[in-house]
Every structure is written in structure tokens, then in C-alpha cells.
Image: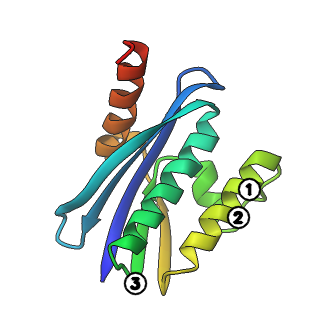
């Protein structure tokens, strides 16, 4: 089974209050999971990795053998495709975590898209950050 993971992370301020959002769809385009989490004070890149890792873990739980990872972070996409080195120590740890989860799948594809093509995951991030800002 193949699943498509739409992941997004965001921080208001860099670093600042951060959240991760994930939407997992099947090949027919039906949403099979949608969730997010508040990450505390983190950088945007940390949040992007946290979202990818959460999405990969969920796809593994759902029994996927192959995944397409759709991200609006060009940096994380290129690092996961081994096109860019990961120099920042905290991101190195996140990269290793993502790489190890991705190794569970027979096939993994990483695709960079602009934010407009990742609206559902982006919406989850903003909903979480708005709730935290409002004290809920």
C-alpha cells in the first residue's frame, strides 16, 4: 500500500512557538489521518522535520509499504534526498530520526511543493498556533 504524506511545520518567530501538521492520504486522495502537535519554542526547520517524522511514523502504523512525502520546505526535502548536507547539530538529530523511520518503507519519495499546494497541513499548524496564542 502506498500513502501520501503532506507535512508542514511552522514557528511564529524563529525560534518561537512552533507546531507540526500532517495529512495522510491514500492513492485515491482520501484522507486517512490528519493531526498535529504543539512543539514549544522551536525553529521553523525543526518544526518541518518534526512534521515529517510524525507523518512517516503514522504511515508506518497504517501499514504503508511506500510513501510520497510532500513538503513545502525545500531545505528538508533536499536534505532528505541527500542533495544538501545537514550542518546544524539539532537538525542533524532530526535528519537521523527521519532517515531511520523512512528506512522502514520499501520506497520513499520526497517532493517539494509551494505552500499553496500544502494547504491542509499548513491549516493544522496555524490552528494549533492560534489556539496556543489564545490560551486554549
How would you rate the neighbour count of disc 3 (Cα within 10 Å): few for under 14, some for 14-19, many for 20 or more?
Answer: some
Q: In the figure, 100 relative to 8: above or below?
A: below
Q: Which residue is mark 2?
A: 96
Q: Which residue is mark 1?
A: 93
Inter-mark Cα distance, 2 to 1: 5 Å
Q: Which percent across, then down, holds residue 45?
A: 62, 41
Q: In the figure, 126 relative to 60: above or below?
A: above
- Tell me the residue at 17%/71% (across/down): 28
* Quarter of the N terminus within the rendering: bottom left
Q: In the figure, 85 relative to 73: above or below?
A: below
How would you rate the neighbour count of disc 1 (Cα within 10 Å): few for under 14, some for 14-19, many for 20 or more?
Answer: some
Dot 3 falls on a residue whose secondary structure is: loop
Q: Which residue is mark 3?
A: 65
Q: Out of 74 and 27, give the one closest to the viewer.
A: 27
Q: Are marks 2 and 1 in contact (CB under 8 Å)?
A: yes
- Tell me the residue at 63%/72% (across/down): 100
Disc with the residue nearer the chain's start (1 vs 3): 3
Q: Looking at the image, which residue sits at the far front?
A: 136
Examine the rendering and report whether any part of residue 88 can be seen. Answer: no
Dot 1 falls on a residue whose secondary structure is: helix
- Tell me the residue at 63%/59% (across/down): 78
Disc with the residue nearer the chain's start (2 vs 3): 3
Q: Which percent across, then down, holds residue 92?
A: 76, 55
Q: Which percent across, then down, holds residue 126?
A: 37, 29
Dot 2 falls on a residue whose secondary structure is: helix
- Tell me the residue at 76%/46% (across/down): 90
How would you rate the neighbour count of disc 2 (Cα within 10 Å): few for under 14, some for 14-19, many for 20 or more?
Answer: few
Inter-mark Cα distance, 2 to 3: 20 Å
Amino acid at each position: 500500500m502506498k500513502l501520501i504524506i503532506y507535512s508542514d511545520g511552522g514557528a511564529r518567530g524563529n525560534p518561537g512557538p512552533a507546531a507540526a501538521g500532517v495529512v495522510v492520504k491514500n492513492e485515491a486522495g482520501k484522507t486517512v489521518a490528519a493531526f498535529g502537535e504543539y512543539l514549544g519554542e522551536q525553529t521553523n526547520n525543526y518544526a518541518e522535520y518534526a512534521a515529517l517524522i510524525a507523518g512517516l511514523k503514522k504511515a508506518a502504523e497504517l501499514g504503508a509499504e511506500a510513501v510520497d512525502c510532500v513538503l513545502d520546505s525545500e531545505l528538508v526535502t533536499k536534505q532528505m534526498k541527500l542533495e544538501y548536507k545537514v550542518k546544524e547539530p539539532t537538525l542533524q538529530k532530526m535528519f537521523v530520526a527521519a532517515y531511520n523511520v523512512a528506512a522502514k518503507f520499501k520506497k520513499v519519495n520526497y517532493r517539494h511543493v509551494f505552500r499553496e499546494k500544502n494547504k491542509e497541513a499548513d491549516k493544522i499548524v496555524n490552528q494549533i498556533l492560534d489556539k496556543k496564542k489564545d490560551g486554549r
